[in-house]
Image: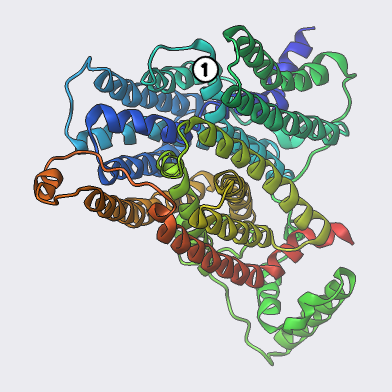
């Protein structure tokens, strides 16, 4: 029994399940669409001021250099503790201000508090992803997709808990955002760690992933049905409690996997899987000249070689490599020495920064996820402008679609690389085209456009965060994955700063001012009106028409960048995954 308990404590599935629980309450930024109207009315902000808070939130969610650095210096539980304290202090102070229990601070100070509170997410994300990607090196797509999916679902989970507790005022949701994640993280922080998971591979792993996917596919429609029912029907508080208890059961049920594998299954000989599944590793004993010749092959081979079937491709490459060996031995060619690692090997952040592939990922992510984040940050105002009173339902819906996009993005992108040895970024291009259509629905304001647009934007935005981390680990290695991941997340606030903080807010306030002038009969008090810092409201699809069309164009450009990345990385993915198919 002692050995089984020790096996349970060190089980990589226990780490994965605990990381899922942390992620299920870690994405507090997705609740900003629900708490922003409370902040706006309590502090008398206009849309431009509120957008600045949204940008601060996105910066906090994405500026993870400190989290990445601390995760390499401190144990992962120490990084998680720092994140929990930041979350508690930042959002706790905002709650005190909104409730009138602390003095009102200037806008810049409120931005700092939102930044500090949301920055705790970067510690949760970094610790969870780093530990689980190292524990499941051959299942990066599913692992990242599921973890990031639960982070996207956290908005709906927190909203349901808030509905169950039945607080008397909406400001209490801010209190929940401050206290809830901190308590969960502190309770689980010692479990999150690398446990040599690549040496724990068992035949049942495929069934375990299938079970977790089944829970995910059950959890998302369940939450969707509950949210719609609570929005359309006057549900009693007892029924709400029952709904929430079932929700907790679905979230907790994956713990059965490590319990079963540790206490019920007969111990067997685990299989070890390589941390970096590359054919080059099999040639680790080759000489330095062999590696240089391999680099020459990449430069000299015809482009049509990559289009051949795997067996023929390897044959042609072997022939070319043999010719280069002979030419080099005879002095007919001078072999160039390649500096730094090749794509697919371990890069430091500084080595990756000089690679065009990293910047293609970054700008594609900036345009794609930045446009999606603009919708998430302004979802409350978008729904109000189209005549919807309850903004919580759309915040919950986009959280659920975001969840399915992340889980589905990890699953389908894994099929692409495993079964076809094709670059993972092709799935990102598809997601960005889906988002472009979603922005058009928001722009038109057709009947049901909020529901369809929320679906398309949520799925497309979520898919980015399953695909990008997995692709970055494949192209630039696992050794400095935390630093690389946190650098790429800077694309989120960069996009939000321009798209939401400048474009969306300026267009919204301009349209609101136009409508205010039209509604004012005399027009003599307009100057007095606009000198007072009163919140302006805009009604109709015109409020976000131009913004949504601009965002749609950005998504199309992002898809083009992703396709360029696909073209550039065909060889890399063929080398990593192609040999496993032959």
264 and 50: which one is in front?
A: 50
Residue at far bottom of view? 332
Residue 239 point in image, percent of width and height: 64, 11
Determine whether 352 is above or below 260 in the image: below
Res. 195 visible in picture: no
Say left or right for 99 vs 556.
left
- The mark tally for this picture is 1
Describe residue 28's horizontal placement relative to residue 515 as left or right: right
Q: Tell me the element at label 1.
A: helix
Q: Give me the residue at 68% from left, 35% from top.
A: 135
Residue 129 is left or right of residue 143, and the answer is: left
Image x and y of residue 269, in percent: 87, 29
Q: Is 537 rendered above or below residue 505?
A: above
Point out residue 383 in the picture as x, y percentages from the top left corner.
Answer: 46, 41
| Colour scheme | rainbow
Sort mark 1 into few (<14), some (14-19) or many (20+) by Cα contacts within 10 Å: some
In the rendered image, the vertical position of residue 526 relative to residue 552, given as above or below: above
> Residue at point 65% right, 16% down?
243
Q: Which residue is mark 1?
A: 163
| Residue 107 falls in image quadrant | top left
In the rendered image, the quadrant that contains the C terminus is bottom right
């Amino acid at each position: 029994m002692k050995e089984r308990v020790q096996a349970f404590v060190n089980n990589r599935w226990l780490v994965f399940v605990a990381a899922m629980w942390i992620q299920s309450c870690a994405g507090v930024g997705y609740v900003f669409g629900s708490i922003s109207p409370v902040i706006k009315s309590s502090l008398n902000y206009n849309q431009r001021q509120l957008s600045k808070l949204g940008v601060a939130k996105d910066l906090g969610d994405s500026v993870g250099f400190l989290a990445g650095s601390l995760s390499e210096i401190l144990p992962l539980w120490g990084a998680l503790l720092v994140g929990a304290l930041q979350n508690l202090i930042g959002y706790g102070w905002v709650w005190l201000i909104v409730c009138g229990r602390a003095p009102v601070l200037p806008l810049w100070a409120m931005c700092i508090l939102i930044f500090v509170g949301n920055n705790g997410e970067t510690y949760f994300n970094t610790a969870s992803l780093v530990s689980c990607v190292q524990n499941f090196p051959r299942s990066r797509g599913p692992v990242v997709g599921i973890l990031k999916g639960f982070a996207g679902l956290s908005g709906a989970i927190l909203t349901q808990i808030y509905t169950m507790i039945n607080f008397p005022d909406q400001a209490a949701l801010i209190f929940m955002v401050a206290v809830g994640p901190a308590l969960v993280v502190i309770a689980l922080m010692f479990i999150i760690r690398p446990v040599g998971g690549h040496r724990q591979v068992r035949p049942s792993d495929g069934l375990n992933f299938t079970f977790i996917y089944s829970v995910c596919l059950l959890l998302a429609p369940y939450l969707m049905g509950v949210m719609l029912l609570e929005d359309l029907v006057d549900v009693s508080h007892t029924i709400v409690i029952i709904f929430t208890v079932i929700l907790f059961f679905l979230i907790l049920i994956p713990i059965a996997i490590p319990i079963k594998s540790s206490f019920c299954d007969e111990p067997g000989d685990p299989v070890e899987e390589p941390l970096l599944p590359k054919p080059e590793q099999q040639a680790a004993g080759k000489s330095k000249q062999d590696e240089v010749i391999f680099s020459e092959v990449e430069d000299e081979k015809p482009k049509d070689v990559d289009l051949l079937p795997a067996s023929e491709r390897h044959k042609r490459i072997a022939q070319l490599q043999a010719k280069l060996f002979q030419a080099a031995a005879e002095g007919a060619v001078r072999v160039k020495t390649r500096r730094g690692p090749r794509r697919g090997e371990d890069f430091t952040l500084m080595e990756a920064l000089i690679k065009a592939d990293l910047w293609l990922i970054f700008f594609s992510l900036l345009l794609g996820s930045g446009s999606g984040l603009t919708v998430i940050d302004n979802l409350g105002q978008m729904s109000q402008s189209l005549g919807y009173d309850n903004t919580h339902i759309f915040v919950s819906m986009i959280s659920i679609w975001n969840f399915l996009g992340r889980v589905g993005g990890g699953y389908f992108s894994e099929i692409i690389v495993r079964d076809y040895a094709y670059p993972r970024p092709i799935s990102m291009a598809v997601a960005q085209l889906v988002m472009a259509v979603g922005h058009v629905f928001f722009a038109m304001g057709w009947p049901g456009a909020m529901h369809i647009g929320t679906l398309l934007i949520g799925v497309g935005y979520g898919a980015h965060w399953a695909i990008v981390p997995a692709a970055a680990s494949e192209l630039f290695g696992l050794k400095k994955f935390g630093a690389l991941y946190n650098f790429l997340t800077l694309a989120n606030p960069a996009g939000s700063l321009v798209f939401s903080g400048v474009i969306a807010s300026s267009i919204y306030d301009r349209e609101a001012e136009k409508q205010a002038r039209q509604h004012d009969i005399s027009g003599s008090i307009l100057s007095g009106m606009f000198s007072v810092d009163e919140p302006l409201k805009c009604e109709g699809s015109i409020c976000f028409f131009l913004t949504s069309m601009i965002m749609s164009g950005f998504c199309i450009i992002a898809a083009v960048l992703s396709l360029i990345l696909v073209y550039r990385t065909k060889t890399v993915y063929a080398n990593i995954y192609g040999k496993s198919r032959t």
